[in-house]
C-alpha cells in the first residue's frame, strides 16, 4: 500500500469516461428528497439515465433491472429504509453494483445503525465526506450535520480500513478526494469551494459513482467519477459569480465534457 496516494492518471480517467459514455448506464437512485431533481439532471447531463423508484416492492423489482443502484440515507425514514434494504438485496442477487452514501452518519444513532446494517450487505462502493467515512469505520469524527469538520487526508487510513473490511471501493471527498480499495489509492484534485455552497453536489457525485461502478476497474472508475465532477465544477465556477448561477453552468459543463478533457492531469502534486 502506498503511503502517498498517486494522482489519477489522465489516460485511465479518459478510458473510464469513454466506457461510461458508451454504456449510458441506467442508475436507480434511492436518494434523499432534497436532491432528487438535481441528481437526475446531473446524470442526464453526463449521458446516464436516472430513475427514482422509491416504493419498497417496486424498488426491489427495479434494482434488478437497473445497471447500478445508489442508496443515499440523507432523508431517512422507516418506509425508505425498507425500500433501501429490499433494493440492496435484489441488486446483490442480480449482480448489480450498489453505492452507499452514508449521509450524516456518526452524529445520529438511527441512521448510524442503519448504515452499518447496509454495510453488511456489501456495497460495491462507498462515497462520503471525511467525518462520515471515519464514523462508518468506527472512529470518532467531527461531523456537523451533513458537513465534515475533518480533512479528507486525515480520513484516508479509515477509508483504507473500511475498504478492506467491506470489500468496497471507498471515496472520501474534500478539498482533495481520495479513492481506495484498501491496497491501492488514487488522489483526485480539483473542484472549487463554491461547490460546497450548493446543495446536492456531494449527493449527485454518489450517483455518478454508481454510474461508473459498473466498470471492471472499479477503483479507477470511481476515481474518474470524482474527477468528472471536480473538473466540471472548476469550469462552472470560473464562469459564474455565485451559487445562484452555478447550477445551470455546472450542468452545461458536465454536458460539454469530452474524453480528451479527462486526459490532462489536474495537478502535479497536492
Image (spheres, rainbow, N blue to C red):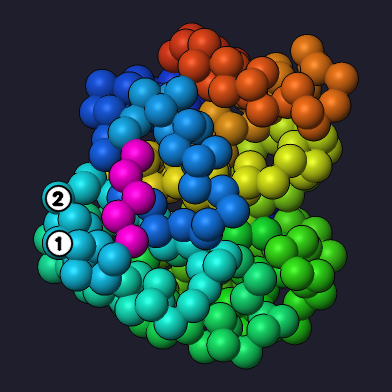
Q: Disc 1 on helix, strand or loop?
A: helix
Give the side of residue 86 with respect to residue 101, left or right.
left
- Look at the image and tell me in which quarter the N terminus lies: bottom right
Q: Residue at x 31, y 34 (%)?
A: 49
Camera-nearest residue between 24 and 73: 73
Residue 224: x %, y % from top left: 49, 34
Q: Which residue is mark 1?
A: 61
- How many circles with numbers are drawn on the protein? 2
Q: Is residue 109 above or below residue 125?
A: below
Magenta stretch in the rendered image: 50-54
Q: At x 39% / y 58%, what residue is drawn?
A: 30
Residue at left offset 21%, top offset 47%: 66
Secondary element at image label 2: loop
Instruction: Residue 248 in the image: state x and y as whole percent.
Output: 64, 21
Q: Is residue 240 above or below residue 84?
A: above
Front residue of 243 and 16: 243
8 magenta-colored: no
- Would you say the residues marked 2 and 1 are in contact, meaning their CB atoms lie under 8 Å apart? yes
Rounded to the nearest whole Å, what is the CA distance between mark 2 and mark 1? 7 Å
Q: Which mark is residue 93?
A: none
Q: Which mark is residue 65?
A: 2
**Residue 58 figure quarter:** bottom left
> Is residue 52 within the magenta segment?
yes
Give the quarter of the image for residue 57: bottom left
Amino acid at each position: 500500500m502506498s503511503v502517498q496516494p498517486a494522482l489519477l492518471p489522465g489516460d485511465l480517467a479518459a478510458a473510464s469516461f469513454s466506457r461510461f459514455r458508451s454504456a449510458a448506464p441506467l442508475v436507480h437512485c434511492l436518494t434523499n428528497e432534497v436532491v432528487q431533481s438535481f441528481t437526475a439532471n446531473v446524470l442526464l447531463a453526463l449521458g446516464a439515465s436516472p430513475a427514482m423508484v422509491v416504493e419498497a416492492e417496486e424498488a426491489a423489482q427495479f434494482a434488478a433491472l437497473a445497471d447500478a443502484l445508489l442508496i443515499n440515507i440523507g432523508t431517512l425514514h422507516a418506509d425508505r429504509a425498507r425500500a433501501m434494504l429490499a433494493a440492496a438485496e435484489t441488486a446483490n442477487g442480480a449482480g448489480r453494483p450498489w453505492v452507499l452514501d452514508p449521509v450524516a452518519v456518526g452524529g445520529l444513532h438511527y441512521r448510524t445503525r442503519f448504515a452499518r446494517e447496509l454495510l453488511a450487505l456489501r456495497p460495491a462502493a462507498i462515497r462520503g465526506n471525511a467525518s462520515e467515512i471515519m464514523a462508518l469505520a468506527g472512529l470518532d469524527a467531527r461531523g456537523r450535520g451533513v458537513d465534515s469538520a475533518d480533512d479528507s487526508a486525515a480520513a484516508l487510513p479509515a477509508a483504507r480500513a473500511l475498504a478492506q473490511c467491506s470489500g468496497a471501493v471507498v471515496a472520501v471527498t474534500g478539498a482533495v478526494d481520495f479513492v481506495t480499495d484498501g491496497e491501492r489509492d488514487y488522489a483526485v484534485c480539483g473542484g472549487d469551494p463554491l461547490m460546497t455552497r450548493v446543495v446536492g453536489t456531494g449527493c449527485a457525485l454518489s450517483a455518478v459513482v454508481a454510474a461508473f461502478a459498473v466498470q471492471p476497474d472499479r477503483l479507477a472508475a470511481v476515481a474518474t467519477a470524482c474527477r468528472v465532477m471536480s473538473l466540471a465544477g472548476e469550469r462552472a465556477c470560473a464562469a459564474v459569480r455565485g451559487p445562484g448561477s452555478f447550477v445551470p453552468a455546472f450542468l452545461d459543463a458536465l454536458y460539454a465534457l469530452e474524453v480528451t478533457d479527462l486526459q490532462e492531469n489536474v495537478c502535479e502534486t497536492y
